[in-house]
Image: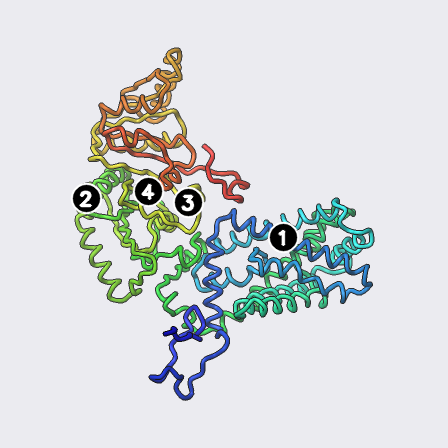
Amino acid sequence: MAAPHDDSPPDGGGDREHTDNGVPESGSVIPDRFSSDEVFQRIVADADHEITSGARELFFAALAGGFAITITLLVYASMYPQTDSSVVAALLYPIGFIYIIIGGYQLYTENTLPPVALTLERLASVPALLRHWTIVALGNFTGGAIGAVVLAYGGVFSPEAAAVAADLAATGVYETTPWELFFKGAFAGLIVAGVVWMNFAAQDTISRLVVVYLAFLTIPLGNLYHSVVSFTEAVYLMLVGDLGFLLAMTDFVIPVLVGNTVGGVVLVTIVNYYQTTEQRLETARFEDVRRLSIRETLLGSLAGRSYVPLFDTVEEFVRDPDSYRILVPITNPRTESRLVEMACALASTREKGVVHVVHVVQIPSGSNPGGRGPDHDRIVDESNKLLTDVRTIGERYETKMETSTLVTHRSFEDVFDRANRTRPDLVMMGWADDGVWASARAERPIDELTNRLPCDFLVVKDRGLDCSRVLLPTAGGPNSVLSAEVARGLREALGAEISLLHVADGSGDRDRGEAFLAEWAAENDLEDADRIVDESGDVEDSIERAAADNTLVLIGATEQGLLSRLVSDSLHMNIADDVEASLLLAERPSDRPLLKRLIGAGRRNK
């Protein structure tokens, strides 16, 4: 027997009353189009995917969109001299935009609706929105500039078409005032944002194609301006004429860009947002979303529904700027108490040391804990019971202890989100097959996530976690300095004996190795530590031999992307498996050049 056909729209169309035979009750109507709430739900779902995309994906999708705009300029300028009619030439103007919207490329003006809808719902922060806009605009302009270069020097245009293309930018720069450009751009922004709304309201590709074509046809017919097209025209005139870059930006591109933004955001996005009901997201798909706090919305880096835990007992947070905070994410309070104890020992050496233990409770994707309902209370109560023994550790070390519970479909990525939110000085994580690493699912690329460390990170391989004899191999660098800070803390709090190890390049390099180690020890307040110089030149073998007499090995990250390699299980360290001592890996944040951040480079600079 065939399953009955469901005419209700996707993404939560709501319940409808039916009789026993499946026919709608009297007065009940099955609509053949989406309601405004349902359209909004579809936009939010799509925007969540876009705004949480990596910088590389966004940039190249936007670059492709900017280059597709070149097609619009090409056909419009080429058709005009052939037909001697701007109206006929305008008939092919929408072709580039059809490529972009139907093909799923990124266009700046198209992004004045979905990401802003997320921000209005407090599902994405303002900084996340601005990051998204910046990457898309840069990609669009880069693609448009590449297209302009091809048109200027590739022999694509006929002489007549080349003259028309140059005249398009000249008209905008020299014959149209900035105020006129702004308002013409605002109407164009209204049209584009309206197209996006209608695109999500349409239920088939043909309808979307017709909407896109007719809407973008109004831009040339109405003598309006689109920022990416205008930028491409301006770059073309700079290449073939005498237009200066600064004049082109201030008197042409920027007024149009601002107008597009205002038209898309104010005239469409906000108006459409307020025509929806207060229950616009209260469906099975969105009911358990936690909205960002006001501070997170204005200043945070969180973005998207999938980047917010299902619930988090830390709702609002105000940090004492003079405190030294250690964040300890754990998945099992019973088995990870030694990790918490080490954190408390380190915090006790600080004047205002604070340890914040967060119990990460991971539930399968698609599970529904019920928001603030009974399931929420049950999970929190059970977590509080498990954390009872953990709190006593802080009392023993006379350290301020905070605990919280975080329930999420993910876990690893939420450690980074929590660190961004509470701004600790140090994160200590256990490294085990059944811990946070085992559930390292993330919508963003792991490389991008771990290349933007919010603070110092310590990853601990617990083999009894005896801190009485500590080995610290060093070749210098900020990560070894972090290891030295940990070693000093363990010495002060627990009386740990410290040995320093430096592996020289060869037998003739001992004197230089000893000089380096003595100087490094003095710089890091470890002059009383034993100093070992190994002349074998083999770092891992040297550490393994020295580790035999020690209970804990502190290793600063000497290779790029340590955490990303840990998560992806591509960190090949024999030490981790061969030594019997506990292992602590230390990594300190470092900067990447802007270009590498933009294209999503997978490794940070040493």
Where is residue 15? Give x, y as percent: 38, 77
Amino acid at pointer 4: Val
Residue occupying image coordinates x 29% and y 62%: 369
List the residue tagged with mark 2.
393
Where is residue 428? Give x, y as percent: 30, 41
State yes or no: discs 4 and 1 in contact (Cβ < 8 Å).
no
First reached walking from the N terminus: tag 4 or tag 1: 1
Alpha carbon distance from label 4 to label 1: 41 Å
Identify whether 76 is placed above or below 396: below
Of labels 4 and 2, the one closer to you: 4
Amino acid at pointer 1: Gly
Q: Is residue 384 visible?
A: yes
Q: In terms of secondary structure, where does tag 2 sit?
A: helix
Alpha carbon distance from label 1 to label 3: 28 Å
Q: In terms of secondary structure, where does tag 3 sit?
A: helix
Amino acid at pointer 2: Ile
Count the marks.
4
Of labels 4 and 1, the one closer to you: 1
Compare residues 389 and 28 and report the one nearer the observer.
28
List the residue tagged with mark 1.
66
First reached walking from the N terminus: tag 4 or tag 2: 2
State yes or no: discs 1 and 3 in contact (Cβ < 8 Å).
no
List the residue tagged with mark 3.
446
State yes or no: discs 2 and 3 in contact (Cβ < 8 Å).
no
**Where is the N terminus found, in terms of image quarters?**
bottom left
Q: Of all residues shown, which one is farthest toward the top?
A: 508
Q: In terms of secondary structure, where does tag 1 sit?
A: helix
Alpha carbon distance from label 2 to label 1: 57 Å
List the residue tagged with mark 4.
427
Label 1 packing within 10 angstroms: few (<14), some (14-19), many (20+): many
Identify whether 69 is placed above or below 355: below
